[in-house]
Amino acid sequence: MQIKKLTLSDAEQAYNMLIAADRTYSSLSAIKEMLSDKKTHIFGAFDGDKIVGISLCYELLRPSDKKELLGHGIDILPELRGRGIGTKINEFRKNWARENGFSEIWTVIRHDNIASRRANEKSDAKWDGKNSCVYTIKLS
Ligand SMILES: CC(C)(COP(=O)(O)OP(=O)(O)OC[C@H]1O[C@@H](n2cnc3c(N)ncnc32)[C@H](O)[C@@H]1OP(=O)(O)O)[C@@H](O)C(=O)NCCC(=O)NCCS
């Protein structure tokens, strides 16, 4: 299993992976746009040439000199969950962020998503015990 930061040439593979993980809203053109964007970072777990897990991250623009990363979503192929891949991607993301000058990684996890919480905690993520409210406004 190899983890790496995806490039534009991985777009089709990334798309196929997301569809296999039931993220049916995914579009190849949107993934290409994300992979072309300098402030979007996508990490993939490879089994040979095949992407089996993906983590989407965005560089936050903040009114300070500090660089922060938002971990927005992570998906492992359903048949390969629970085998340590999510933990490995999170660990890679943390090391990559540190090496690239980020001071903090944010992520929002549903309280009942034990696998995701554990996979983050194993990479030193800490929940402050308070900030668990996520409000969304659907506009369409
Ligand atoms: C959440 C997800 C990314 C975790 O990746 P993963 O490869 O399955 O997780 P890992 O195998 O690295 O396991 C991480 C920890 O969670 C635990 N875990 C894994 N699956 C679990 C489950 N279904 N229930 C409870 N704990 C679970 C593991 O035991 C491990 O903890 P441990 O080392 O203390 O035993 C993956 O399961 C997934 O894609 N889920 C669907 C999409 C999703 O929920 N994304 C996150 C949105 S925030």
Image (tube, rainbow, N blue to C red):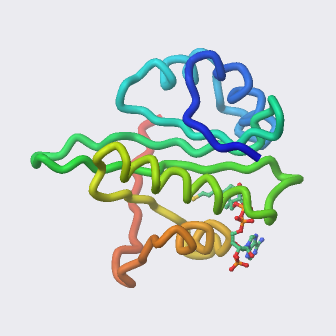
In the rendered image, the residue lying farthest to the right is 79
Residue with the most extreme front position: 99
Q: Nearer the viewer, residue 91 or 18?
A: 91
| Residue 45 screen position, x and y as percent | 70, 43
Q: Which residue reaches farthest left?
A: 64
Image coordinates of residue 61 in percent, x first then y, are 22, 40
Residue 26 picture location, percent across and down: 65, 29
Question: Can you give x and y, in whole percent of width and height, for residue 85 in the image?
Answer: 72, 56
Regarding ligand 1, which quadrant of the image does it lie in?
A: bottom right
Q: Which residue is located at x 39 percent, y 84 percent?
A: 129
> With respect to residue 116, does 136 lie above or below?
above
Could you tell me which residue is drawn at 66 percent across and 22 percent down? 10
Residue beneath the point at 10% across and 49% down = 64
**Left of 68 or right of it: where is 7?**
right
Residue 4 picture quarter:
top right
- Where is residue 87, by image quadrant? bottom right
Decide: is 18 above or below 130: above
Q: State the image quarter where residue 115 is shown.
A: bottom right
